[in-house]
Image (cartoon, rainbow, N blue to C red):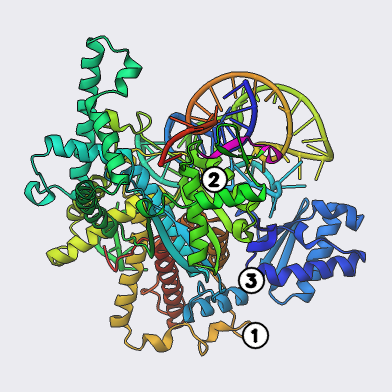
Amino acid sequence: MPSPNMFQDRLQAILLPAVQAAFQANFQKEVDPKAVSFQPTRPEFEGDLTINVFPFLKISGKGPEQTATAIGAYLQEHVEVVDRFNVVKGFLNIAIADSYWLDFLREAAEKDILQFPSNGKQVMVEYASPNTNKPLHLGHMRNIFLGDAVCRILKATGNEVIRAQVINDRGIHICKSMVAWQHYGNGETPASSGLKGDKLVGKYYVEFDKNHKLQIAELVAAGTPGPEAEKKTPLILEAQNMLRQWEANDPEVRALWSTMNGWVYDGFNTTYARMGVGFDSVYHESGTYLLGKQDILDGLAKGVFFKKDDGSVWVDNAPEGLDEKVLLRGDGTSLYITQDIGTAIQRFKEFPGLSQLIYTVGNEQDYHFKVLFIILKKLGYSWADGLHHLSYGMVDLPHGKMKSREGTVVDADDLMAEMVQEARNTGEELSKLDDLSGAEKDELFEQIGMAALKYFLLKVDPKKRMLFDPKASIDLQGHTGPFIQYTHARIRSLLRKADTLFPAVEATVFSEEAPMNTGTTDIYALLPEERNVIKLLHQMPAVLQESAVKLDPAALANQTYELVKAYNGFYQTVPVLKEEDADKRGFRLSLSRAVADVVKKVMDCLGIAVPERM
RNA sequence: GGUCCCGUAGCUCAGUUGGAUAGAGCACCUGCCUUCUAAGCUGGCGGUCGUUGGUUCGAAUCCAACCGGGAUCACCA
């Protein structure tokens, strides 16, 4: 777990030792650095950073005002970047010198402040992991966008990232689609029907269910009790038989299975491509479902597990406050968790350098992963400490849960198409883009629609359950992806205009040579709107780092929104191109450029593209 | 029933290493386009932070109990 000061920015890194020194100088006492918390000064007070001195009164032996004043005075005298301070109750508000902000901005204008050096770590992130019997839906989208964003964030913060998925391509549910296709398909293929492969196979999965229900009703009418009828319909018996044939490697069954799964993969790949995601390591359950058995038996031999009278193998997690759990059936066949154990071991064999393996899986499997990680630890794998369940909440619809049986599932392809269409409607209505070609517009509306969708799903804390209201998600105003894109496009437009209006702009742009870059002579007094923007820029590296450690893209998404909101406030009230003083103009252009660069980079970490104009 | 998660404005969400008068967006009302893109910006309305107790200088944040919602506890995946 990160310690409180882990995400401090460079300013806090400067101030913290000084605060410690201040306690030493004034009160001859050590202060625990972890106890010193810096927070942004509330807007109604003067200052940039605030330290609350209440926790230190015992150390200082003085009242809050006196303590805060003593620390403030010390900081002002000994720390160059501390310009002024004021004390309100127990709060020490510190005003940072404009020269510090200007120096920081110059740095931000000249290099990528979000560039992290490689940390030499290799991390695997598993996400998506669909079944091949039905198309991807809204639930998958939260998983996929979350997993993709986490990959991008980890990569940006210096990790080597391996994107992984396990495709569930075998089992009774796959056989259901196959049986139904044999009965009702009349040889239909994606080519003959024009249907996307995953949609076609999904259609037969539904078809199976429909006819299965009819057969249940027939059996019940003929006198069979309901629960028994469900297990005895000709269709379900046929599917079970097909599963046995599949496991026995029956060539015909295997051929049909390959064909139909091939259709599904084509469909998935189309969807993944539109989402902008990909994978480096793909496992199929057909290749891994037998893994793990030997590992369980080894564990049994080592006494980590125990066997019951019926021959089943169990683990006792009572010491960890959990229950007993079956790992191997009485007949020696494996279970879901058996396979997961085997797959994890397999992965660390294949990638011995992994320092973390992150599973992006919904929170309904919290218990499963808790058990899985405990077991791997009990088996003695040192890497088990690097296992992490990135657990996220379910996506609800306004009328409740998605239920495939009730047809309330929101299809991924449909939803993306709707969002892009909505972006198109709005874009055409604003008619600012009439000079763009058809293809350029297509690309732009694709970017905007996808941004709306991704941002909507990513801005919410992953671990929380969220509501997806189609009407709200389709909004392109306010706290949305398109709002952020718009700000970026606006800045890019400003910069393009600057290039034509001021051909020598590079020379006038805020730089080493520009007069306002130093605290020694000519200090440019920052406008409040400018300082707000710079401060938010300044926080961004720490927020990126935080979102990487916490695997929380929402933190980054929300900070980005704060940044562009502040920039829009600046843009609205402070002239840039219309500013006649070339230094000020250059400075504001640099500020704008830095915001655009940071926004572009951060949005890229969220898997969202930003357009040059819109 | 056991375990875990959640409950903040009409709606959707921030804020939760304990700190100042709890913030945004949407919706509703209100101003701003002959001036750098109005997918923008102003102002207003809107709160018993589920309830009750506790811990302390201080609680939306920590603890306990309760109320309400969800998940999970399969020789399913």
Residue at 62 percent of width and 75 percent of height:
A100
Residue at 40 percent of width and 72 percent of height:
A576
As drawn, the label of residue A520 is 1
Q: Amino acid at mark 3?
A: Arg
> Does the magenta segment cover residue A347?
no
Q: Which residue is mark 3?
A: A10
Q: Position of residue A340 (x, y in %)?
A: 48, 49
Q: Position of residue A241 (x, y in %)?
A: 27, 35
Q: Residues within 10 Å of mark 3 (few under 14, many from 20)?
A: few
Rendering quarter of residue A224: top left
What kind of element bears circle 3? helix
- Is A428 in front, or is A532? A428
* Mark 2 vs 1, N-terminal side: 2
Q: Amino acid at mark 2?
A: Phe
* Mark 2 vs 3, N-terminal side: 3
- Is A435 in front, or is A223? A223
